[in-house]
Structures are given as C-alpha cells and as structure tokens.
Image (spheres, rainbow, N blue to C red):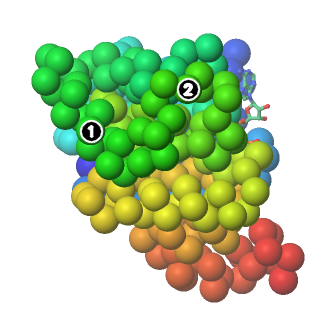
Amino acid sequence: MLKVKNLSAGYDNVPVIFDVSFEINEGEMVSIIGSNGAGKTTILRAVSGLIKPFAGEIEFLGKRIDMLPPHEIVKLGIAHVPEGRHVFGKMTVRDNLLIGAYTLKNDDEVKKTLEEVYEIFPRLKERENQKAETLSGGEQQMLAIARGLMSKPKLLMVDEMSLGLMPIFVDKVLEILKEISRRGMTILLVEQKVQEALEVADRGYVLQTGRIVAEGSGKELLESELVKKAYMGM
Ligand SMILES: Nc1ncnc2c1ncn2[C@@H]1O[C@H](COP(=O)(O)OP(=O)(O)OP(=O)(O)O)[C@@H](O)[C@H]1O
Ligand SMILES: [Mg+2]
C-alpha cells in the first residue's frame, strides 16, 4: 500500500533521515521505533506532504505522492495523527471530529462515519459536547486518533501516541488501535516506547540517527540483540 524508497529529508537543506526504505502492506500494522531525534516524525511529515523530500520516492497505492500537497494526500486516504495531538481545546469533542471529516462528500457520509467512530470510542460519545481541553490526556489522544479516522483513511499514521500518558492509558490506546486494525485498517505506528510498539505490530523497523538499521516481525525485533541492547537495557 505504501512504498518508501531511498527517502532523504530534513530541514533547511540539512538531512535528518538518510536513504530510508520501508513498505506497508494492506491490512498490516507496522511500527517504526527509535529514540528521541531519530527522525520518526520527519518520516511521517514527508509521507503526508508537510515537508518535501530531498531525494527518494513515496508511492501510495501505486501512485507517486511525494510531489503532492498535504490536502491531496489526505484525499487519497492517508491520515496523520500528529505528535502532541493538537486538538482544538476550545471546541467540543464533536466539532473536533467534524473538522476531521472535511474531505467527506456529504452530510450523510459524515453522520455515518461519526457513528462508526463513536462505536470504537464510546467514551468520546459520552463526552461529545465537552470542550476538548477538559478531556484527560488519554482521552485527548483518543480524540486525535478518532479525528484521523473521520477522513475515512486507508492508512492511519499515528505519531508517538504514548507521549505523556500513564502506562495504563498507553495500553488502552494500543488496544483500541489493535481493534481498529482488526477491522481492516492499515496502521503505521511511530514510537519511542519500543516494547509496546513491537508487541502490537505485525512488522517493525528500527530507526537510528536517521537510518533504518533493522527490520523484521515485531517478535523477531523484540528478541533481537540490537533491540534488547539499545532499547531495553539488557
Ligand atoms: N522544524 C525543524 N527544523 C529543524 N530541525 C528539525 C525540525 N524538526 C525536527 N528537526 C530535527 O530533526 C531531527 C529529527 O527529528 P524528529 O522530530 O523527526 O525526531 P523523532 O524521532 O520524531 O524524535 P522524538 O521521539 O523526540 O519525537 C532532530 O535532530 C530535530 O532536531
Ligand atoms: Mg517525533
């Protein structure tokens, strides 16, 4: 579904990811793991068109997308749930969700999608008229993911959902992502929480200072010397 080939990207002509290649098949849940500053967010920004790659190619459903503006990429079916959530605090939960639906064609479709999203996130339905800023951190993360789903994406990319959450909420949100995956969604998860992210993933990639240094099934990576040494202090 997504094919990234020899991607280099960065800021002000300074590359921070180098020759990155990976792919995601339809229906898979794939994790890219790496420490602070490894370049995880930069990869997602390049895929969603927020920054232009210096080199390489990005293909989605057989079509080059690396020249397209972000709104075209959303329309093709890629949703990017950004690091830090960025929900609109003064707006209600429901209005935040409706913003996510801006690419949908008609009101019926919006209504139907909202219902589907509420089915996955019953807690957001209970709080639909509450201002987003009054939600707990975990609930705001759920809202950010739910808003991504409102565009009816084919690929959902979630950046560092664990940030600032207590372990119990991290597990809860991952459980929900797993459920979304079981319903057929293709998911790219980017995380510093290495163990959790590899446990839920079908496959994973390890990113170190801008380069992919290992890949494999979630289980293979968890058992690899590299991951144990570099991220789990073993
Ligand atoms: N807007 C920017 N301008 C200049 N440099 C940037 C910018 N955003 C990120 N960088 C640099 O790019 C490198 C990779 O950052 P990136 O945000 O992709 O890492 P990350 O893996 O997502 O890290 P974290 O786990 O902390 O979110 C870092 O050295 C960072 O300082
Ligand atoms: Mg990041």
* Residue at the image point whose x is 56% and y is 74% from the top: 199
Name the mark nearer the viewer: 1 or 2: 2
Q: Give the side of residue 81 with respect to residue 230, left or right.
A: left
Q: Which mark is residue 115?
A: 1
On-image quarter of the C terminus = bottom right
Residue 127 picture location, percent across and down: 51, 35
Is 78 drawn above or below residue 171 in the view shown?
Answer: above
Q: Amino acid at mark 2?
A: Gln
Q: Residue 3, how many percent across, how many down?
A: 34, 47
Side of 132 where 129 appears, left or right: left
Give the percent coordinates (x, y) of residue 21.
47, 50
Relative to residue 191, is residue 232 depicted above or below? Answer: below
Instruction: Locate ligand 1 by image quadrant.
Output: top right
Q: Quadrant of residue 71?
A: top left
The answer to whether residue 168 of the structure is visible from this angle is: yes
Q: Which residue is mark 2?
A: 130
Question: How crowded is the residue under tag 1: few (<14 C-alpha within 10 Å), some, or many (20+)?
Answer: some
- SS type, badge 2: loop
